[in-house]
Image (spheres, helix red, strand yellow):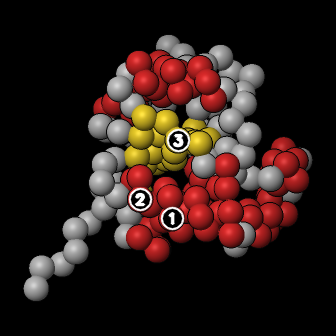
Amino acid sequence: MTPPPRPAPLYTIGYERASLDAVIAALRARGVATVLDVRELPLSRRAGFSKTPLSAGLAEAGIGYVHLKGLGTPKEGRVAAHLGRMDRFWTIVAEKMATPEAEHDLVRAAGIAAPAPACLLCFEAEPHVCHRLRVAEALTARFGFTVEHLHAAPPGGATSF
C-alpha cells in the first residue's frame, strides 16, 4: 500500500520592513502559487500591501491571492500585541482558532495549499511574534504540511531563508 501523497510545502512570510518587490522575489524563489492572507483586515499603511494592490501585484507576478479573514487576529489581539501583552495575545489567538470561522478557513487553506506551494502572509517579519505561526502549526498538525518561514529582504538588503 502506498502512503498518501504529502502536501506541497507551506511557507509563511511577513512584510514588515520589506517592499512588495522583495516579498514577491522571496515567494517566486520558492515557487509559491498562492498567497493566503491571514490578516483579519487586509489593510496596510505600507505601500502595496492592502488587499487590492497586493492582489494585483501578486497576479502580475503569476501568484494567486486568497484572503482568509477567519484566520486573522481580532482587534483586541492586535492591541494586546502592540502593547507587548504577548500572553494575552496568544490567548486571543487560541480563542480565535477555536471558532467555526477559523475552522472553515483552516480547511479552506489546506485545500488550496495541498496541491501547490502556498504562503501564509501577515505583517510581522518574525513568525514567533505573529499568529501565522499558530495557523501554520495547525495546518501541520492536522494536514501534514511541512512549514518554512521566509524572510523578505528589507529595502537594499538580501533575501534570507
Give the image location of residue 122, x and y in percent.
62, 41
Residue type at mark 3 is Val
* Residue 7 position within the rendered picture, expressed as x and y whole percent measured from the top left: 30, 61
Quadrant of residue 97 in the image? bottom right
As drawn, the label of residue 66 is 3
Residue beneath disc 2: 111
Q: Are marks 2 and 3 in contact (CB under 8 Å)?
A: no
Q: Residue 17: in sight, yes or no?
A: no
Which residue bears the numbered disc 1?
Answer: 107
Q: Which mark is residue 52?
A: none
Q: Residue 122 or 105: which is nearer the viewer?
A: 105
Mark 2: few/some/many CA within 10 Å (<14, 14-19, 20+): few
Q: Nearer the viewer, residue 142 or 30?
A: 142
Q: SS of the residue at dot 3? A: strand
The residue furthest left is 1
Q: Nearer the viewer, residue 62 or 146?
A: 62
Distance of mark 2 from mark 1, alpha carbons?
A: 6 Å
**Left or right: 115, with 53 as reference point:** left
Q: Earlier in the sequence, mark 3 or mark 1?
A: 3
Q: Amino acid at mark 2?
A: Gly
